[in-house]
Image: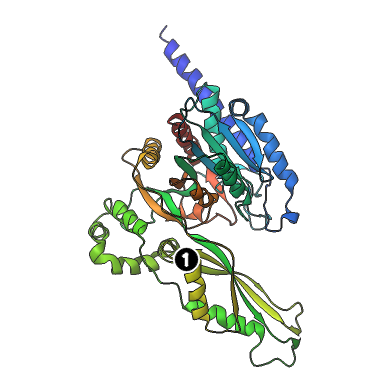
């Protein structure tokens, strides 16, 4: 009789371990499917996307029994979980396309989904573990758990899984158009975005859960020089490539102006209440210290610098087709992330002014303005904040709004909802954040499982 409690505990522990192992196995299986999206869709291997879609009903049978699924915009997926009563729904978002990875320079093959103990715990390696299959599979694990237990949400819950977030976002746009045509106005939309981070804010030792209430605009600006070509043995004083190089140097020498947006101010005041020493006073009195703190943020790190200004980065260059021929066209692609409070028009005007050369043609491609700012009060914000604290520790984490530096599919949902938020419920170190769209992308198993708990708790509140 005295052994019974320990036997039950052992049985429960075995069951929990088996459940975790099953979750991890499903995650790894989906990471192994190389759903790489490309700007030129003719180069996309759609068979891999079909395989991903086909795998989900096998891996998540309770989800596919309880929810309706439709394919939208070619390969994006929209699920509807019918609620018990009428009311504004919730949309949980993620995308399953990933950026390319050749394997060159990777410590582990990018689509092997290897689990490696690095001395501090198990780590899952692979493209998409952070961006964004980690969130997608966490959502499915949470819904599967709840659906298998017979749970049904109070109001409708939609799962929106985009297939080309990394390129055009056309799948998410099609989903928004579908929901809009049906009169759906979500009370909450949650997509990828901020994470639980440490060491970002000066003087603050506690981890901060940064929830995106807006996101920067995005556009690719082309700088083009068209000029007479010819043999490279008789070059003019200023070739097309040299003129383009001069334009790039001038642009880099004239960064966009730095300023704190209202969301920046709220973020700094929130985290500042937990800062140590003089930094607590400095962050709590921005009316006085604002200019000094702005200079600090422009120098502290790449992340803090990007928080307070529009950024530009030259990502692609093209010129002559031969080593001994002058370029008749030289072109640079500049990826621009537009600060909240600015605009595409202001961005183009700044670039033209910085370059100061009418021979360099400036053109914005696929421009997207900064997103509207979602409120940091009300039921949706309180639900997210409460769920974060329940998952990461009531007194262990600071919950703060911020402006997301990248772009996500959620920006399209601002057409149909005033409560669009961006948060990936994972703890990410600076090094791990640096693997996004880069080599050696990976996620800690413990962090990913905590993300599953976040979504499981959130779903239970819907």
Vertical relation: 4 (above or below) 109: above
Q: Position of residue 77 (x, y in %)?
A: 63, 40
State the residue in front, 3 or 298.
298
Extreme-top residue of the structure: 1
Q: Position of residue 448 (x, y in %)?
A: 51, 40
State the residue in front, 300 or 171.
171
Q: Secondary structure at mark 1?
A: loop
State the residue in front, 365 or 239.
365
Asked whether residue 124 is in view, the answer is no
Q: Residue at x 42, y 65 (%)?
A: 305
Vertical relation: 369 (above or below) 413: below
The answer to whether residue 166 is left or right of residue 195 is right
Quadrant location of the N terminus in the rendered image: top left
Asked whether residue 370 is in view, the answer is yes
Vertical relation: 74 (above or below) 437: above
Q: Position of residue 24 (x, y in %)?
A: 58, 35
Q: Position of residue 14 (x, y in %)?
A: 52, 22
| Coloring basis for residues | rainbow
Vertical relation: 13 (above or below) 355: above
Answer with the quarter of the image where residue 3 lies.
top left
Answer with the quarter of the image where residue 437 lies.
bottom right
Quadrant location of the C terminus in the rendered image: top left
Q: Residue at x 62, y 34 (%)?
A: 26
The answer to whether residue 419 is left or right of residue 47 is left
Q: Which residue is mark 1?
A: 343
Answer with the quarter of the image where residue 59 lies.
top right
């Amino acid at each position: 009789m005295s052994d019974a409690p320990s036997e039950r505990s052992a049985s429960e522990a075995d069951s929990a371990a088996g459940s975790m192992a099953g979750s991890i196995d499903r995650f790894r299986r989906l990471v192994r499917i190389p759903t790489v999206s490309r700007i030129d869709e003719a180069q996309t291997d759609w068979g891999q996307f079909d395989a991903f879609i086909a795998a989900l009903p096998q891996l998540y049978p309770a989800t596919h029994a309880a929810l309706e699924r439709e394919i939208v915009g070619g390969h994006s997926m929209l699920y509807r979980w019918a609620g018990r009563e009428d009311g504004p729904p919730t949309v949980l978002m993620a995308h399953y396309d990933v950026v390319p990875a050749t394997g060159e320079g990777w410590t582990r093959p990018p689509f092997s989904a290897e689990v490696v103990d690095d001395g501090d715990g198990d780590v899952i390696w692979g493209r998409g573990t952070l961006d964004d299959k980690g969130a997608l599979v966490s959502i499915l694990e949470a819904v599967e758990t709840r659906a298998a237990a017979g749970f049904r949400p109070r109001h409708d819950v939609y799962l929106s899984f985009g297939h080309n977030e990394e390129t055009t976002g056309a799948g998410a746009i099609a989903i928004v158009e579908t929901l809009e045509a049906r009169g759906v106005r979500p009370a909450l939309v949650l997509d990828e975005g901020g994470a639980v981070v440490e060491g970002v804010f000066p003087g603050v030792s506690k981890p901060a859960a940064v929830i995106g209430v807006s996101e920067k605009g995005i556009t690719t600006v082309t700088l083009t020089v068209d000029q007479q070509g010819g043999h490279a043995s008789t070059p003019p004083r200023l070739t097309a490539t040299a003129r383009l190089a001069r334009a790039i140097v001038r642009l880099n020498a004239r960064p966009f102006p730095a300023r704190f947006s209202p969301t920046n101010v709220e973020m700094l005041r929130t985290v500042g209440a937990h800062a140590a020493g003089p930094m607590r006073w400095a962050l709590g009195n921005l009316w006085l210290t604002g200019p000094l703190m702005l200079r600090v943020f422009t120098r502290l790190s790449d992340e803090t610098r990007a928080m307070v200004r529009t950024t530009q980065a030259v990502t692609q260059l093209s010129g002559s087709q031969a080593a001994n021929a002058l370029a008749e066209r030289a072109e640079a692609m500049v990826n621009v992330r537009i600060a909240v409070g600015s605009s595409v028009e202001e961005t183009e005007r700044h670039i033209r002014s910085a370059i100061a050369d009418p021979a360099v043609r400036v053109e914005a491609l696929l421009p997207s303005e900064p997103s509207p700012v979602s409120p940091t009060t009300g039921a949706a914000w309180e639900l997210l904040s409460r769920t974060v604290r329940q998952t990461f520790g009531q007194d262990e984490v600071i919950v703060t709004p911020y402006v997301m530096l990248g772009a996500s599919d959620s920006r399209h949902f601002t057409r149909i909802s005033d409560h669009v938020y961006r948060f990936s419920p994972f703890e990410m170190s600076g090094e791990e954040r640096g693997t996004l769209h880069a080599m050696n992308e990976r996620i800690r198993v413990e962090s990913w499982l905590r993300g599953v708990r976040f979504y499981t708790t959130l779903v239970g509140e819907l």
